[in-house]
């Protein structure tokens, strides 16, 4: 009766009493009063005031309630005062109730006979007969029966509607509370935090005895969070995915069982008497399991809990996606840091060591080696740097293309990842005794289509196998490493290039001759491999005025300072040259126009902010530059068109106010 508000029941019984003229009371199955009589029956009250009448009436009520519950049908019984009372059985929310009513005589003669024969024993004097006869209710027997059945029908309708209304109110409050708790879940929260909220909801809102949230790991459900009376026991109890658990995973449907055989087969002891298991589904697969123990769950609650598990599955998926996102962000940060670090290293031997150390760190491994193709007639791969390998031994190792794992990766140009070399039939080479695990990676180092070496990584620190995510990260790093190695090659040729007068004597930058050679090579390479690259032309604003006011020596210092700042602001792959006078040119390989704009802006801003203020007469607060950018093949397919268009963009910037970067467009 908790589902129907007490005040509503009392009001409804009073309404029925006024409608029928009968006094009504509601009793529990043990004779306890739930609602007292709605209209006072004065004559019956007078009978009950006597000690004899009180005892007889209480026994009459108790016997009548027990009989009608057993019969499960409306019954009329004659009470101690000779009055008829009907007993109406009600069955609601798994509990029996009885409504009593009446206190009715079938005729005045029946009342007269009782009054003069037994009235004095109940303390009723004969001279008051006429007065009492005015208070009694007289009805036909069939009318009493029909009225009782109508009362029963109305009460059933009332209880059903009241139950549904109360149930809906409970559902609303329950779902509102659940949604409030779910809305507070942070996507950054780990799965354990979601499970904690899930168990709290089951314990406090659904009165569950014990709860366990289990996460699927291969062929086992392992507990992540437990709560309730059996918390300690459940925390150490995993469930194998077999038997009825296999059915749950296969059909993705909840399961309820009170079978001790099923429960024992799952490995639980006799403290567990019932199990309600609901799958938690993520990405169309069962990722976890919500188990409720020793608890009665109604159908309505089961539906809500199932939907709750769907939300939990979605949260698990969101957490997984967030973890992947965070991991990718960390990887990008690590790659940027690694690339920045490589950019600062010009000495080849130090660069080799840094590439190996960084790649081993990125893969969370213990061993690694860098192998490069020698330029001599031997045509062999040699180890340039290694970690976790004896350095004396590595000098003697020379591998021809196609030989061994590294030789095959070099020849094919395809990365290789192996879980266990001893079990992989495609790899004919078995691991050597000094390696801890059979899992390894080999990644080719490429400059364009040319393969220059191989990066080898083995022995993950955790003892696990290398994953596809590991090799993807190392492939990205290998691209940076290849560019850094290519740049290192050019640094090794610096002396030779100086001998050929390819550097500008004042700024130390490449001169126009070298620029034209590299520009031609980049055109050929980009056209051959269908790549894009960008050209930036840089001019110092008001440089003639600076020379006129400060002198040519001061102008030379400005040129040198600008050259140094511009060179430091460029990336590893970029090439800057002095094009002539106060004009510079920058080649940006494999760079589209938008990315080139960002590089050019970094140069422009750095020069404006970092160039020291040493002038006295030059009438400007800062020395600035203007930059024009054109890209191959969109803005020209030969050197003449590209240089002309970059110059046009530069001078458009001059006209628009200087101190800016302008991208070439066909029309302003």
Image: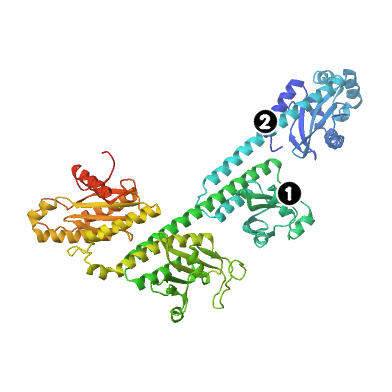
Q: Nearer the viewer, mark 2 or mark 1?
A: 1
The answer to whether residue 33 is above or below residue 246 is above
Q: Which mark, by number, is residue 256?
A: 1
Tell me the quarter of the picture where residue 482 sits.
bottom left
**Coordinates of residue 435 in the picture (x, y in percent):** 54, 75
- Residue at the image point whose x is 67% and y is 53% from the top: 291
Dot 1: few (<14), some (14–19), or many (≥20) neighbours within 10 Å? some
Dot 2: few (<14), some (14–19), or many (≥20) neighbours within 10 Å? few
How far apart are labels 2 and 1 at the CA level?
36 Å
What secondary structure is found at the residue carrying circle 2? helix
**Coordinates of residue 354 in the picture (x, y in percent):** 39, 69
Looking at the image, residue 595 sits to the left or right of residue 213; the answer is left
Looking at the image, residue 336 sits to the left or right of residue 500; the answer is right
Report the residue that reaches farthest toward the bottom: 392
Q: Which mark, by number, is residue 300?
A: none
Looking at the image, residue 582 sits to the left or right of residue 432; the answer is left
Residue 187 visible, this orientation: yes
Report the residue that reaches farthest toward the front: 377
The answer to whether residue 438 is above or below residue 283 is below
Instruction: Give the position of the N terminus as an image quadrant.
Output: top right
Q: How many marks?
A: 2
* Residue that badge 2 annotates: 8
């Amino acid at each position: 009766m908790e589902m129907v508000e007490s005040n509503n029941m009392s009001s409804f019984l009073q309404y029925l009493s006024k409608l029928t003229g009968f006094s009504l009371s509601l009793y529990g199955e043990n004779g306890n009063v739930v609602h007292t009589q709605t209209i006072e029956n004065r004559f019956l009250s007078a009978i009950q005031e006597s000690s004899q009448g009180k005892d007889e009436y209480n026994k009459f009520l108790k016997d009548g309630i027990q009989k009608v519950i057993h019969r499960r049908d409306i019954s009329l019984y004659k009470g101690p005062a000779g009055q008829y009372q009907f007993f109406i059985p009600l069955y609601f929310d798994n509990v029996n109730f009885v409504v009593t009513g009446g206190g009715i005589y079938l005729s005045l003669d029946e009342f007269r006979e009782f009054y003069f024969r037994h009235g004095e024993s109940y303390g009723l004097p004969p001279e008051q007969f006429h007065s009492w006869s005015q208070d009694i209710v007289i009805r036909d027997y069939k009318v009493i029966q029909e009225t009782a059945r109508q009362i029963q029908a109305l009460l059933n309708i009332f209880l059903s509607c009241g139950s549904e209304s109360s149930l809906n109110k409970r559902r609303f409050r329950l779902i509102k509370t659940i949604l409030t708790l779910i809305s507070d879940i942070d996507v950054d929260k780990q799965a354990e935090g979601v499970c904690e909220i899930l168990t709290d909801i089951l314990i406090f809102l659904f009165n569950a005895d014990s709860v366990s949230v289990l996460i699927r790991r291969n062929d086992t459900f392992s507990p992540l969070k437990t709560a309730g009376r059996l918390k300690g026991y459940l925390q150490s109890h995993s469930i194998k995915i077999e038997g009825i658990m296999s059915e749950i995973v296969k059909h993705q449907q909840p399961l309820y069982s009170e079978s001790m055989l099923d429960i024992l087969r799952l490995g639980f002891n006799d403290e567990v008497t019932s199990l309600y298991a609901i799958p938690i589904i993520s990405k169309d697969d069962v990722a976890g399991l919500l188990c409720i123990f020793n608890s009665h769950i109604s159908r309505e609650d089961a539906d809500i809990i199932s939907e709750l598990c769907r939300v939990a599955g979605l949260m698990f998926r969101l957490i997984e996606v967030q973890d992947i996102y965070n991991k990718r962000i960390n990887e990008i940060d690590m790659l940027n840091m690694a690339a920045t670090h490589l950019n600062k290293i010009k000495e080849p031997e130090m660069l080799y060591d840094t590439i190996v150390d960084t790649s081993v760190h990125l893969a969370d491994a213990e061993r690694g080696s860098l192998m490069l193709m020698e330029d001599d007639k031997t045509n062999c791969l040699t180890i340039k740097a290694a970690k976790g390998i004896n350095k004396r031994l590595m000098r003697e190792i020379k591998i021809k293309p196609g030989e061994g794992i590294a030789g095959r990766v070099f020849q094919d140009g395809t990365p290789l990842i192996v879980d266990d070399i001893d079990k992989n039939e495609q790899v004919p080479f078995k691991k050597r005794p000094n390696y801890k695990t059979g899992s390894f990676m080999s990644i080719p180092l490429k400059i364009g289509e040319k393969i220059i070496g191989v990066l080898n990584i083995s022995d993950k620190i955790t003892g696990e196998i290398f994953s596809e995510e590991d090799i993807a990260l190392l492939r990205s790093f290998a691209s940076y490493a290849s560019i850094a190695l290519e740049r290192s090659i050019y640094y090794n040729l610096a002396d030779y290039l100086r001998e050929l007068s390819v550097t500008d004597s004042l700024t130390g930058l490449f001169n126009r001759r070298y620029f034209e050679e590299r520009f031609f090579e980049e055109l050929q390479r980009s056209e051959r491999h269908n790549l894009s690259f960008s050209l930036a032309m840089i001019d110092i604003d008001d440089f003639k005025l600076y020379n006129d006011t400060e002198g040519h020596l001061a102008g030379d210092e400005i040129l040198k300072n600008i050259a140094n700042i511009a060179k430091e602001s460029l990336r590893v792959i970029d090439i800057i040259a002095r094009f002539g006078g106060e004009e510079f040119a920058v080649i940006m390989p494999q760079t589209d126009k938008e990315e080139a704009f960002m590089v050019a802006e970094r140069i422009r801003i750095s020069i404006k902010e970092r160039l020291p203020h040493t002038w006295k007469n030059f009438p400007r607060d800062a020395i600035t530059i203007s930059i024009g950018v054109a890209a191959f093949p969109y803005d020209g397919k030969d050197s003449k068109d590209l240089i002309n268009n970059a110059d046009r963009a530069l001078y458009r910037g001059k006209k628009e106010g200087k101190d800016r970067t302008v991208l070439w467009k066909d029309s302003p």
